[in-house]
Image: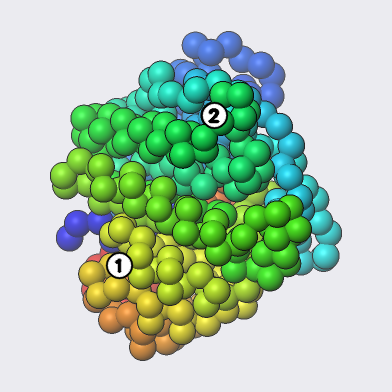
Amino acid sequence: MNPPFRAEQIGSLLRPKALLDAWNSGADRQRLRELEDEHIASVIRWQESLGLRSITDGEFRRESWRLGFVSKVAGFGRADAIGEVDLQRDDAGNEARIGSAPIAVARVRRTGPIAADEVVFALKHARGTVKATLPAPSYLHYPRGDACVDPNTYPDLDEFFADVVEIYAEELAAVHAAGGRYVQFDEVAQTLLCDERIRAAVRARGDDPDRLIDLYIDLINRIARRRPEGMTIGVHMCRGNAFGKWMASGGYERIAEKTFSTLEVDAFFLEYDTIRAGGFEPLRFVPKDRFVVLGLVSTKTPKLESMDDLKQRIEQAAAYVPLERLGISPQCGFASHRRGTGLTFAEQEAKLRLVVETAAAVWGAA
């Protein structure tokens, strides 16, 4: 079976204490690299011991799921997000801004590997299929809208988007040349636009949420059309996960017809761990040649889900997407930021083991 597999994990994993201590103490680059190599090799063996066939490096070389991208691409600076479009929330009602956002202060260009070097190392140690993860291109626009560029550098935004597409196309080619055949884009912006509060905040800063959906679909499609032959691309529709918090509430119905019907990718990884994600009805818009991985297991709470409940939810989803085109995963990574989500290593292992065992029970194999 080619990817996606019945049992998937989204990408990031809890960082070992030795790595966190090295980062926090300001260890030099050589020592940090040695520790990263050691612990990535170990976490790859651990994933395979659980029965996972989709393997990542745990994003152990990254501070967070997104920051590694702009730090490896020339032309980006940092600025504040515009509008209340980036609120992180918890179940107690607390809210906090992320605040920081990329801005193109010079022509943006790829100057070296973004994820391809991670793939090179992982492939040396993995027997399974290595999955590379990248932030979706919307991350470079959404926090500031059209103010994501210095207008003196990019008087025409279409030039910026063309450069962004080129960066991603070059990186996909590099991942393929390194031996990688499986890439996941982590898409937050489109999922946030399921939330009526966020849509209102986007309108308040002068943007049209539906125009943004069209733009972000177009960017991914332009990139996907330039993928090397034989490469599988999936999109993880993320609702926010850093530090165990969330950003969006509302079912996929708001975006489903456009996003599911017109994104030219092979798979959707959809968060379905809480009622905030709504029901499975929007899956009716998924084309017949797409695979759907249901993110039914939470990385935000330590409580272990019931396999019977998971099987029941998979059966419910199969009313809209046939069982043969479904898989299961956690709803997100376990450490979108290296500080993690509050779970322990034992809880992380129990959750991933449950994913694999549920897949085996439903489909006969993970």
- Please give the count of numbered marks on the rendered protein: 2
What residue sits 41% from the left and 24% below the top?
Answer: 110
> Local crowd at mark 2 within 10 Å, few (<14), some, or many (≥20)?
some
Tell me residue 197's x, y (percent): 73, 67
Q: For the residue marked with disc 1, what is the amino acid?
A: Phe
SS assignment at label 1: strand
Question: Which residue is disc 1 drawn over?
Answer: 291
Left or right, 229 with reference to 36: left
Q: Residue at x 26, y 48 (%)?
A: 225
345 left or right, relative to 195: left
Quadrant including the N terminus: bottom left
Return the disc, 2 or 1, that comes first in the chain's sequence: 2
Q: Is residue 303 left or right of residue 258?
A: right
Location of residue 129 with respect to 195 vertically, above or below: above
Relative image position of residue 102 (x, y in whole percent) = 62, 34
In this orientation, does residue 234 appear?
yes
Residue 42 placement (x, y as % from top left): 40, 35
Q: Nearer the viewer, mark 2 or mark 1?
A: 2
Q: Which of the numbered marks, if any, corresponds to residue 154?
A: 2
**What kind of element bears circle 2?**
loop
Quarter-of-image position of residue 8: bottom left
**Residue toward you, 234 or 311:** 234
* Relative depth, front residue between 149 and 323: 149
Q: Position of residue 66 (x, y in %)?
A: 55, 39
Quadrant of res 317: bottom left
Q: How far apart are the two marked residues, 2 and 1, measured between alpha carbons?
A: 37 Å
Mark 1 Cα shell of 10 Å, populated few (<14), some (14-19), many (≥20): many
**Amino acid under disc 2:** Tyr
Question: Which residue is depicted at the point 25% across and 33% down?
Answer: 173
Residue 358 found in image quarter: bottom left
The C terminus is located in which quarter?
A: bottom left
